[in-house]
Amino acid sequence: MTEPTSTSVRAPGFALGAAADAYDAAVEGARADEWATRLFDRDVTLWSDDPAVQTSLAERLGWLEAPVDFADNVAGLEGFGDGIVQAGFTTAVVAGMGGSSLAPDVLHRTFGSQEGYLDLRILDSTDPAAVAAVFDDLDPLKTLVIIASKSGTTTEPNAFLAYFWDVADKALDQIKHHVYQKPGGLMAVITDPGKSLEAIPHRDDFREVFLNPPDIGGRYSALTYVGLVPASLIGLDLDALLASALAMLGACREPDPARNPGVSLGIAMGTLAQAGRDKLTFLADDEIDSFGAWAEQLIAESTGKHGVGIVPVDLEPLGAPDVYGPDRVFVRLSVADGTDGGRDALAGQLEAAGHPVIRIELADPIDLGGEFVRWEVATAIAGVVLGIDPFDQPNVEEAKELTRKVLATAGRGHAASDAAATGLAVTDPTLTSMLASHLGRPASNAYVALQAFIAPTPARDEAFARIRAMLRDATHVATTAGYGPRFLHSTGQLHKGGPTTGTFLQLTADHPDDREIPGWPYTFGQLIDAQADGDFAALKSHQLPILRVHLGADPDAGLAALEHAIEAALRTTSEG
């Protein structure tokens, strides 16, 4: 178990440069209008004067009390985790998307599994190769699968449920007297009560059902069952994690916005975005660098709507100060005795060059519990500054509806999507010139988003990092990268509803080893291709620039060819 430690509850350090005056003015306004007090009083007029919007807002503020409420459940949660260990399980799989999977992923990547506890895997991709990578080397009878779905109707977790139910059922058939007679004994579910639970197949057969408070949105659910159930399975000390969160929660009640660690950050985020500094770039120590993926989905989905928003930039490789454009703000997120990898020096150089830099230091990685709270508060306050509702997602349904239309035509054995025909093959002789036209001269406030509808691997992460560095260094614009369909549940809202400054490069691939979804009329390969089609069509409907490149049957070879083509395209553009 991780020992408790002191919690970082100070306001961030700000070096805001030319934006300092706007920040100071906003702080004065927040002080006069009592933003912090009104936030914790759940005063929905902070965000809207529209009664209909206010009603919706009132149903989305339960996260403000989540650390308090769930601190009372620690004994039960840790008892559940210990019971799963004693029952002989060795691995847990969290099957969910976006806010339902990212907090568990951060906690496991940061802390690992304590001795004697379960390994943890995250399944948030419908690529059949990703499904195979998660399940094929596991003993299904020693694996606990957690279906995490706030609505109960989310396509991906229900597909994962159908798949593992079939795998477990076949494994149980081989053993006459297994302690679990049904696959549900190998599964748990995290969802909302009422219609959400009722929508989940086999809901009466699960080993355990965890019902989250319905007034907490998925992206604000890190400190609910969504994050805490998986944390209990890896042996994390929940008392320590929640102590950090409670200390931050108390500090965020501070009425003076300048001293409030969450409100001050939110004001800075919002005022910087209004001043054109809307590319929030994370520079995090190695030990906590997975936190950016969770913050990315929180910020992007909460702020990216109605033509405004903040573009989080996570895991972009470090560059020289002169390759960053005037739309950047940098968050230097460090932990005591952490591995900075040159980030401190870069942050100092960026500040000297006039870029805004926000500095946050954690005393210990366990203080990520407090950071969940800080960034939730900050994002809610940034919504006040930007004049938007940070709790809705008006554009998320677009790609889903278009995906459903594609899948409606699919039958088993028939392609739901002809990705190769509708995309530019990586072997196409015009690839370099098309890339040069698409990527070569973006606007100074643009960002380039790589959208990869392929299975995630470390080697592909490295390839995307190299491509991002090339693009950033040549064009001086920010870059982001996401695997589909995961990013549809995090940055997808921003892409369609936020500032119209994105340039999108969509990547698809063949599925030589496709997997059926038992009982469904289409396969995992057909599903992910349809999801790519749906997002492509949604972006096109917003008249946003998007180019699809089809990587073929070998995505790694295709990525290597794409990398060379992008390098050549950027060279052509610079010479021109």
Image (cartoon, rainbow, N blue to C red):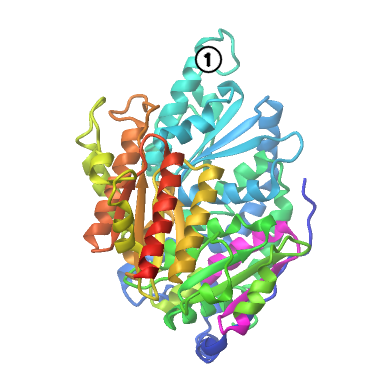
**What residue is at 69 percent from the left and 30 percent from the top?**
85
For label 1, the residue is 172
Q: Is residue 53 magenta?
A: no
Residue 92 appears left or right of 62: right
Residue 259 appears left or right of 171: right
The picture places residue 124, in percent across and down from the top left corner, at: 47, 42
Kindly give the residue lying farthest to the left in the view shown. Answer: 409
Residue at disc 1, secondary structure = helix
Q: Nearer the viewer, residue 336 or 432?
A: 432
Magenta part of the protein: which range?
351-378
The picture places residue 41, in percent across and down from the top left corner, at: 52, 73
Is residue 103 visible in this depiction of the protein?
A: yes
Q: For the N terminus, give its image quadrant.
A: top right
Residue 214 appears left or right of 320: left
Q: Nearer the viewer, residue 135 or 81?
A: 135
Is residue 494 visible in this depiction of the protein?
A: no
Residue 340 appears left or right of 444: right
**What residue is at 64 percent from the left and 78 percent from the top?**
349
Residue 421 vertical placement versus 474 (above, below): above
Kindly give the residue lying farthest to the front in the view shown. Answer: 575
**What residue is at 58 percent from the left and 38 percent from the top?**
121
> Mark 1 Cα within 10 Å, few/some/many (few <14, many 20+)?
some
Q: Nearer the viewer, residue 471 or 103?
A: 471
Residue 299 vertical placement versus 135 (above, below): below
**What residue is at 43 percent from the left and 80 percent from the top?**
276
The picture places residue 151, in percent across and down from the top left corner, at: 40, 46
Q: Is residue 364 magenta?
A: yes
Q: For the C terminus, give its image quadrant.
A: bottom left
